Amino acid sequence: MWRRLAGLLLVFAAATAALWLLSSRLSAGQARRPLRFPSDLEELRELAEALRDYERQHGGAALALFCAAYLYKQSFAIPGSSLLNVLAGALFGPWTGLVLCSALTSVGATFCYLLSGAFGKQFVVYYFPDKVALLQRKVEENRSCLFFFLLFLRLFPMTPNWFLNLSAPILNIPVSQFFFSVLIDRSHSVTNHLFGCHFLLGHTAQTACDGCGSIDTRDPHQEIQQEALEAG
């Protein structure tokens, strides 16, 4: 049991170090600020501006860092992916952001599934015996229509998604059904991307959101005053 814990901690430490090194190398802006996960909308706007600036100078760098950060959160069941969903809408546009986040969520959740299967089965059963037993009964009752039952659990959760990701290998859920149930479930998040794209672009420079159409953020009263001054 302790060997499994040591193995999980080693994987987590290696992933954290790799993400930190990538973030340090791809630090954005002239001040070379280290990038970090946003904790509120204000930090999210600042991060969006920093990544846009860096993306204009080094194509693909922001995408690489975003993908690495998203997979890190999903793989280790770390909360806060909703802010990254909004960030994706602002950086890449709502539809590209939707496709990107759906794919990353599915891959990251599958990594979490595999890590739990390799290192965490005993810990999940030890710390959550009642929840695991309840899910086990429900899965066995719906084994004949397991894929649709998984979709139901995602859309109308009786347990948090992170716990479902951790307990899935214990419940003998095939990884293929697990992956596609997560992928289909993410389609409803398009509203988050649309909201995030328009919200962030309303407070920052208009870039990166071709899918949202043209957004005019100019003040017409200031333009009229400027024209009057020029005419005078």
Image (spheres, rainbow, N blue to C red):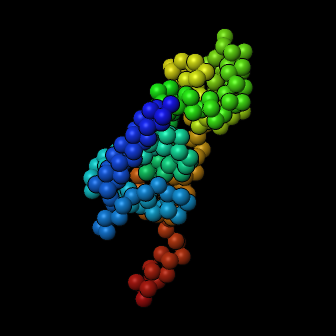
**Quarter holding residue 186:** top right
Determine if residue 106 is in view: no
Q: Residue at x 35, y 64 (%)?
A: 33
Q: Residue at x 48, y 75 (%)?
A: 223
92 over 140 or under it: above or below: below
**Quarter holding residue 46:** bottom left
Query: Outermost residue, front direction?
Result: 2
**Residue 51 screen position, x and y as percent:** 38, 56
108 over 118 or under it: above or below: below
**Residue 197 screen position, x and y as percent:** 51, 52
Q: Nearer the viewer, residue 170 or 19?
A: 170
Q: Residue at x 36, y 43 (%)?
A: 14
**Residue 158 screen position, x and y as percent:** 72, 33
Q: Nearer the viewer, residue 132 or 104?
A: 132
Query: Outermost residue, top direction?
Result: 144
Horizontal side of residue 156 vs 9, given as left or right: right
Determine if residue 190 is in view: yes
48 over 71 or under it: above or below: below
**Residue 159 screen position, x and y as percent:** 68, 34
Horizontal side of residue 59 vs 173, given as left or right: left
